[in-house]
Amino acid sequence: MVNPLTPLVDGAYRFSVAPMLDCTDRHFRVLMRQISRRALLYTEMVVAQALEHSNHLDRLLDFDEIEHPISLQVGGDDPIMLAKAARLAEAWGYDEINLNVGCPSPRAQAGNFGACLMAKPDQVARCVEAMAEASALPVTVKHRLGIDDLDIDSLLMAFVDRVSIAGAKRFAVHARKAWLEGLDPKQNRTIPPLQHQRVNELKQQRPQLTIEMNGGLNTPADCLQALQICDGAMVGRAAYAHPLRWQSIDEVIYGEPPRSINASQVIRGLVPHAETHLHRGGRLWDLCRHLLQLVEGVPGARSWRRDLGIKAQKAKADLNVLHKAAQQLEDAGL
Ligand SMILES: Cc1cc2nc3c(=O)[nH]c(=O)nc-3n(C[C@H](O)[C@H](O)[C@H](O)COP(=O)(O)O)c2cc1C
């Protein structure tokens, strides 16, 4: 069953929060959902092999209804395993499934998935084809401009051409190449220069394809600029580090009525989710670690963060910590 909110129908991908390991877990996604009701949210990458062998699929796949529209990102190179992942994604109610062809980590390389697959368009095509056949979900791909010496536009075009014929419905392009040898994943997000122009050219050369721009988009204005040519703007680090910076995004990108939300309202909005999480035996810190970025650039921000950090990390921390954190902000007019 395809979720009625499928982003291919309502254009949710015009703004998305990028998949980020250790960041875009369900707690952060629920936080971002307080700020944007329309953004497409990506999960962290889940390795297809982990889905195959896990006895705790709920831990890897569960999400809250309010997280829709949501894309499950998977890593892998085996069409059979990825087809199973697509079936699971559909059964779990995801709106789409996204294949990671951009991760340059040694672990991904050792497993023959992530960015190294840019050298194997046929293999990626087989994976996408298997995923598209296995479920009715849109299959999308996130990738780089190139890797190592395979970094020219003709190869990039050949990659998207091959993979789109296999059934990929959208391409999220991190606008830099990856060096698989010599740079670690963090360096691979900063040292290879951003080349937005090459993503724009890809869209111009292939107007029939749906292309999301990713990399270095730091403000809603940057996203609007990217949307002048591309179909979507995907934001990673600037969403995680400055969540409230994006509070106008529904208005700016999707034409929704203006709506303002402050840090204390975000925290209060998280209370039902926190309650369920605690009830299931989770720790308050699992959520609160993502809240530290909510308050920035105002007097008292540092002590508020310190206070929250100390209280929320206690093993028995309960909802009172959240209520007090919100109250402190309200008392300070934030
Ligand atoms: C901490 C962190 C974890 C990331 N994990 C993933 C991941 O799981 N899957 C993926 O495709 N990209 C991952 N990325 C890359 C981002 O999705 C994005 O492509 C990159 O950060 C560039 O976008 P930005 O400049 O807006 O941050 C990660 C980035 C960061 C900072």
Image: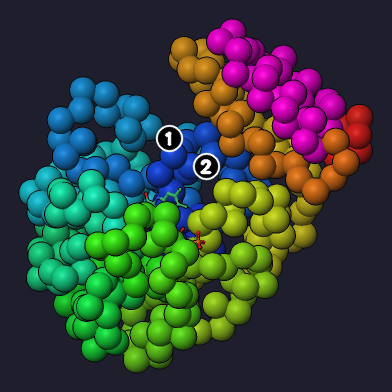
Left or right: residue 329 versus residue 49 is right
Left or right: residue 49 versus residue 41 is left
Estimate the x, y position of residue 105 in percent, counting from the top left. Answer: 29, 52
Give the secondary structure at mark 1: loop
- The disc at residue 63 is 1
Name the outermost residue toward the bottom.
205
**Location of residue 204 (image quadrant):** bottom left
Estimate the x, y position of residue 144 in percent, counting from the top left. Answer: 33, 69
- Relative to 209, is 256 above or below? above
Q: Which contiguous range is marked in magenta?
A: 301-329
Overall secondary structure of the magenta stretch? helix
Q: Earlier in the sequence, mark 2 or mark 1?
A: 2
Estimate the x, y position of residue 2 in percent, counting from the top left. Answer: 32, 51
Res. 316 visible in picture? yes
- For image coordinates 40% across by 44% down, the residue present is 21
- For image coordinates 15% across by 30% down, the residue present is 53
Q: Name the residue under label 2.
A: 29
- Magenta segment includes 273: no
| Quadrant of the rendering where the C terminus is positioned | top right
Q: Given the image, on which type of amino acid does mark 1 rest? A: Phe
Give the secondary structure at mark 2: helix
Rate crowding at label 1 as few (under 14), some (14 to 19) or many (20 or more) other CA atoms within 10 Å. Answer: many
- Asked if labels 1 and 2 touch by Cβ distance under 8 angstroms, the answer is yes
Q: Distance between the residues labelled 2 and 1?
A: 9 Å
**Location of residue 315 (image quadrant):** top right
- The disc at residue 210 is none
Estimate the x, y position of residue 227 in percent, counting from the top left. Answer: 55, 77
- For image coordinates 70% across by 38% down, the residue present is 266
